[in-house]
Image (cartoon, rainbow, N blue to C red):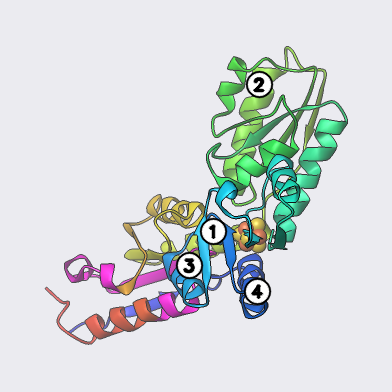
């Protein structure tokens, strides 16, 4: 039987922002009985389930949470939502990642300086919804630079990115925006709000994908940064995104001698280790054709 090598990416799993958010919530859960997070604290069911066991629930309806302690997720929130929380005089545990906070400040600075802001990102993602709130009434979010032709373009245009987007995609996006917007725009300001933690995971995944016959990406199916890791790897080699070890399909491993494993920034260490263990058990079993 040929040997099967299983290798982990040199950077994978929980980023410092997610570790920090979970630590803040876990500490708060010991002090407050009824903590509710506005949306999942991170996009991973294993993490949300573990927090639920500590009494931390999830809700999106602020009007139902009069006597609760509200936890703001690492993605942050818009100033409008912050005002609503303050108006209800709710106590708050804020886990907004410092890198997201820095992007929010950049958006606010641009808006206050009179720039219309375009955000490279998914308009429906919680982080982007928050950024849009900080970026003023003229702000818009899109993944397609050509679409700015449909916007009413301001004379001063600012561009920034959802923190977890890919660096080369952001560069392509800004190039497209520049080519579309230049006839109308007098001043252009680009602020690099990308998260280095995400870039390191993407680069390490790409490197590992280049020497693997199959990549397994571990993380929430609803996690944007995990999906982007899977997209990055699948541009090089066959790639599967799974949330737990139970989703591994043995027949997909048949005939593969080098399997790479990476994981999104919201994937706990236990989920990665369970996947590695299961892959190793297959590797020592009967996966050869
Ligand atoms: S991926 Fe980056 S921006 Fe997002 S929580 Fe982690 S450290 Fe913060």
Quarter of the C terminus within the rendering: bottom left
Mark found first going from the N terminus, 1 or 2: 2
Cβ atoms under marks 2 and 3 closer than 8 Å: no
Label ID, residue 48: 3
Residue 102: in sight, yes or no? yes
Q: Which of the two residues, 277 or 235, is positioned nearer the viewer here? A: 277
Q: Magenta part of the protein: which range?
A: 246-273
Cβ atoms under marks 4 and 2 closer than 8 Å: no
Cα–Cα span, label 1 and label 4: 37 Å
In the rendered image, residue 254, in percent from the top left (x then y), is placed at 18, 70
Q: Which of marks 3 and 1 is in front?
A: 3
| Quadrant in which residue 68 is drawn | bottom right
Query: For the residue labelled by badge 3, is the local secondary structure a helix, a strand or a loop?
Result: helix
In the rendered image, residue 214, in percent from the top left (x then y), is placed at 32, 64
Cβ atoms under marks 1 and 4 closer than 8 Å: no
Q: What residue appears at the point 39 percent right and 56 percent down from the top-left corner?
A: 221
Q: Does the residue labelled 4 lie within 8 Å of ligand 1?
A: no
Quarter of the N terminus within the rendering: bottom left
Query: For the residue labelled by badge 2, is the local secondary structure a helix, a strand or a loop?
Result: helix
How packed is label 4: few (under 14 Cα within 10 Å), some, or many (20 or more)? some
- Classify 190 as above or below 76: above
Query: For the residue labelled by badge 4, is the local secondary structure a helix, a strand or a loop?
Result: loop
Mark found first going from the N terminus, 3 or 1: 3
Q: What residue appears at the point 35 percent right and 76 percent down from the top-left corner?
A: 275
Label ID, residue 32: 4
- Classify 174 as above or below 76: above
The residue sitting at the top extreme is 183
Q: Mark 2 points at which residue?
A: 179
Residue 255: in sight, yes or no? no
Q: What residue appears at the point 34 percent right and 70 percent down from the top-left corner?
A: 244
């Amino acid at each position: 039987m040929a040997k099967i090598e299983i290798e982990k990416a040199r950077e994978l799993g929980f980023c410092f922002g997610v570790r920090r958010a979970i630590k803040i919530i876990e500490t708060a859960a010991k002090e407050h009985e009824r903590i509710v997070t506005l949306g999942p604290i991170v996009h991973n069911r294993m993490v949300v389930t573990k927090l639920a066991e500590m009494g931390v629930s999830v809700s999106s309806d602020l009007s139902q949470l009069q006597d609760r302690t509200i936890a703001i997720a690492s993605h942050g929130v818009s100033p409008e939502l912050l005002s609503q929380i303050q108006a209800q005089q709710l106590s708050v545990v804020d886990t907004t990642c410092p890198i997201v906070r820095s992007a929010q400040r950049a958006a606010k600075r641009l808006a206050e300086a009179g720039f219309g802001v375009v955000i490279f990102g998914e308009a429906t993602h919680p982080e982007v919804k928050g950024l849009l709130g900080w970026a003023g009434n003229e702000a818009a979010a899109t993944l397609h630079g050509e679409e700015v032709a449909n916007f009413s373009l301001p004379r001063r245009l600012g561009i920034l990115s959802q923190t977890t987007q890919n660096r080369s995609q952001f560069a392509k996006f800004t190039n497209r925006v520049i080519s579309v917007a230049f006839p109308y725009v007098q001043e252009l300001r680009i602020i690099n709000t990308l998260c280095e933690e995400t870039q390191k995971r993407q680069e390490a995944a790409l490197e590992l994908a280049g020497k693997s016959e199959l990549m397994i990406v571990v993380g929430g199916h609803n996690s944007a940064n995990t999906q982007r890791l899977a997209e990055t790897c699948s541009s090089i080699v066959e790639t599967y995104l799974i949330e737990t070890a139970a989703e591994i399909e043995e027949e997909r491993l048949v005939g593969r001698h080098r399997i790479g494993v990476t994981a999104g920034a919201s994937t706990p260490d236990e989920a990665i280790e369970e996947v590695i263990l299961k892959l190793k058990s297959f590797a020592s079993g009967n996966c050869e054709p």
